[in-house]
Amino acid sequence: MKKKALFIGGTGTISTGITRQLAANPEWELTLLNRGTRSDAVPDGVKVIQADINDEADVAAKLAGTRWDCVCDFIGFVPAQVERDWRLFRDKTRQYMYISSASAYQKPAISPFITEGTPLVNPYWQYSRDKIACEHFLMEKFRTEGYPVTIIRPSHTYDERKVPLGIHGRKSSWPVLRRILDGKPVILHGDGTSQWTLTHNSDFAKGFIGLMGNPHALGDVFQITSDETLTWRQIYEIISDVLGVPYKPCFVPSDLLVAVDPGFDLEGELLGDKTWNVLFDNSKLKRAVPDFRCTTRFDQGIRKTIENILAHPELQIEEPEFDAWCDRVVAAMEQAKASLMK
């Protein structure tokens, strides 16, 4: 008899890879609960309950009489949302999986080697502090009433729709790709030598599915990332190689970028995350899921991503405001350099 899974969301960057793999898994029957705005991303054989999870009364009515082996929330960002999930599913599921974030780990990082035991504290990013608060609520429910929670902390995960970058606009990665293609300078935070980890969503899915229905996962926390580490210089060099043109880096201190940020949330993105060296220890996950192994190198995965974006104009979203801001920052750095050389 198949086990039953309910995904809240299921069509985002992280969840799409899991949905695809689980749809082909004979052990699971998958249902998505979402608003149905990306029906094209739902594989054959996957059921859909169309609802807005924020309408708790409607969702409760539509889920009346159901029970699940695993419920996974991919779109819970603040404590009120996981509290709602607890009310909806505390008597309906054998496992509740929550997507937190590796950005919740201590910043500035005292050690670049990150385990699940690394302290959770991020004074720079409200997004991360909200994720920490969600974790605290869920673990308290596990301790006091046995709520069967499993917390997952992804880091920078990507798919075929968006290139992972250090500095980007609000809507897409296309404006940075366009700058590279046009031979315009591209902003890199710091000197580009901080180390970073990028994980393809198909690899993330392997670890996630291995934790679904896994008795060793209940009441515990797992990070799921690749073991491959790159500097930001290497990341942009690989992207440029795929595009077939050299890139022109403009190195800018992170704190300066934050100071002149017109609203791209750079304090959280940089000082709260990407500025620091981060090396993940996935040994805990590999003990719980012995066959977990990432097999998509960044140069392989990003080639497919860029080819997909170039083939689909709807993914090439222009952001004139972001491009103009980049031009101003680059011009100011060049002017400062020229004035100091006089």
Image: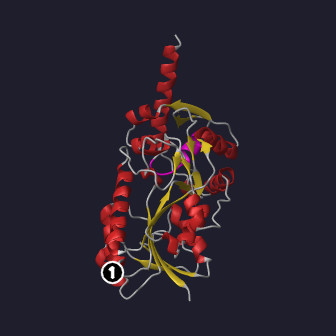
Q: Main secondary structure of the magenta part?
A: helix
User: Is residue 121 located in the magenta-colored stretch of the structure?
Assistant: no
Lateral position of residue 15 relative to residue 312, left or right: left
Residue occupying the far top of the picture: 342
Using the image, determine if residue 209 lies above or below residue 230. Answer: below
**Residue 289 image offset from top left, x and y in percent:** 59, 68
The residue nearer to you, when weighing 164 against 169, is 164
Which span is picked out in magenta? 170-179
Compared to 21, does 92 lie above or below?
A: below
Foreground residue among 104 and 162: 104
Counting every numbered tag in the picture gives 1
Q: How is the image coloured?
A: secondary structure
Q: Nearer the viewer, residue 83 or 305?
A: 83
The three-letter amino acid code for the residue at tag 1 is Ala
Horizontal and vertical percent position of residue 309: 60, 55
Residue at numbered disc 1: 60
Taking the spot 46% from the left edge, 25% from the top edge, the residue there is: 332
Q: Nearer the viewer, residue 18 or 324?
A: 18
Query: Would you call the spot at circle 1 few (<14 residues within 10 Å), some (14-19), or many (20 or more)?
Result: some
Quadrant position of the N terminus in the picture:
bottom right
Q: What element does badge 1 sit on?
A: helix
Q: Going by the image, does 1 lie left or right of 273?
A: right
Q: Decide if residue 106 is in sight here.
A: yes
Q: Is residue 54 visible?
A: no
Q: Is residue 177 magenta?
A: yes
Which residue: 31% across, 68% down? 83
**Residue 191: where, in percent of width, then height?**
55, 32
Q: Residue 24 vs residue 142: left or right?
A: right
Residue occupying image coordinates x 39% and y 82%: 92
The x, y position of residue 326, in whole percent, is 48, 35
Residue 299 to residue 54: above or below? above
